[in-house]
Amino acid sequence: MSSQAGDVLLVVDVQNDFCPGGQLAVPGGHDIVPVINGLIERFDHVILTQDWHPAGHSSFASSHAGAAPFSETTMPYGPQTLWPDHCIQGTEGAAFHAGLQWHKAEMVIRKGFRSEIDSYSAFFENDKQTPTGLTGYLRERSFHRVFACGLAFDYCVRFSAEDARAQGFEALVIEDACRAIDLDGSAEASRKAFGEIGVSLVNSSDIG
Ligand code: VGL
Ligand code: ZN
């Protein structure tokens, strides 16, 4: 499979807090940086996402008295996992991994900046209604195939790929360019959901 007109590489949340040593470290998160750099070279168009929370964000366990990180709560929009404080706007933790060759990116889409709603997907916040504007951007630029990679496979990559599909794009997840948090089998659940809705799983070596 070679990169063609209408393809875009979506690099999700390759930020210090999701890498070892960060506040919400994904095991092996930094291992994908060279793989993604190779992909960035091969794609003509690259978009990044950046998790970008204000301090005291409602997805932080620390904002809920007595709640432990990785527990679940109910928000007005439904169930929400509570996370350690992470990716606070302007902090080193929210910065892209220093090894990521991201300067080619045509757009950086920030998400999770509304205190009261978390946002895993690059397309919609977790209420499934508040758009980020990415659908309109991709349509206006005539992109058809979204190749997603980054962190974490089972949260922000998953939700982004599912929404890409639901918005009418072809969606492919480059699995060796992702790492998972894997809470309660969430990595396997993601693979199953991809199969059901027609999100393809591919490998970076499949892309020429
Ligand atoms: C993410 C949990 C909280 C992600 C972001 O990038 O997958 N996960 N915020
Ligand atoms: Zn977050």
Image (tube, rainbow, N blue to C red):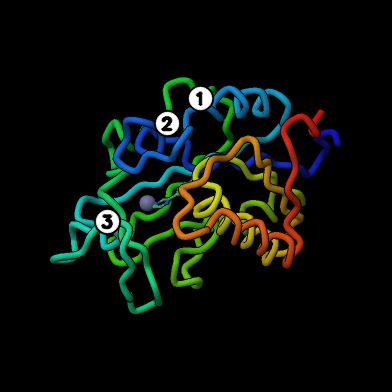
- As measured in the structure, the alpha-carbon distance from the residue carrying label 2 to the one carrying label 1 is 7 Å
Q: Residue at x 59, y 61 (%)?
A: 189
Which of the pair 48/70 is nearer the observer?
A: 70
Viewer can see residue 121: yes
The location of residue 143, given as percent across then percent down, is: 74, 48
Which numbered dot is residue 167?
none
Picture quarter containing residue 50? top left
| Residue 129 rendering spot, x and y as whole percentages | 49, 73
Q: Residue 57 in the image: x percent, y percent? A: 25, 57
Write down the residue under mark 2: 96
Q: Nearer the viewer, mark 3 or mark 2?
A: 3
Q: Position of residue 34 (x, y in %)?
A: 58, 22
CB atoms at circles 2 and 1 under 8 Å apart?
yes
Q: Quadrant of residue 61?
A: bottom left
Amino acid type at circle 2 is Phe
Q: Which residue is mark 3?
A: 69
Q: Mark 3 or mark 2, which has the lower sequence index?
A: 3
For image coordinates 68% across by 23% down, the residue present is 41
**Which residue type carries mark 3?**
Pro
Residue 142 visible in this rendered orientation of the protein: no
Mark 2 residue element:
loop
Query: For the residues marked 1 and 3, what is the alpha-carbon distance in whole angstroms?
Result: 28 Å
Choose top left, top right, bottom left or bottom right for residue 6: top right
**Circle 1: residue type:** Leu
Residue bearing the label numbered 1 = 100
In the drawing, does residue 149 fall left or right of residue 185?
Answer: right
Above or below, 57 relative to 102: below
Q: Secondary structure at mark 3?
A: loop
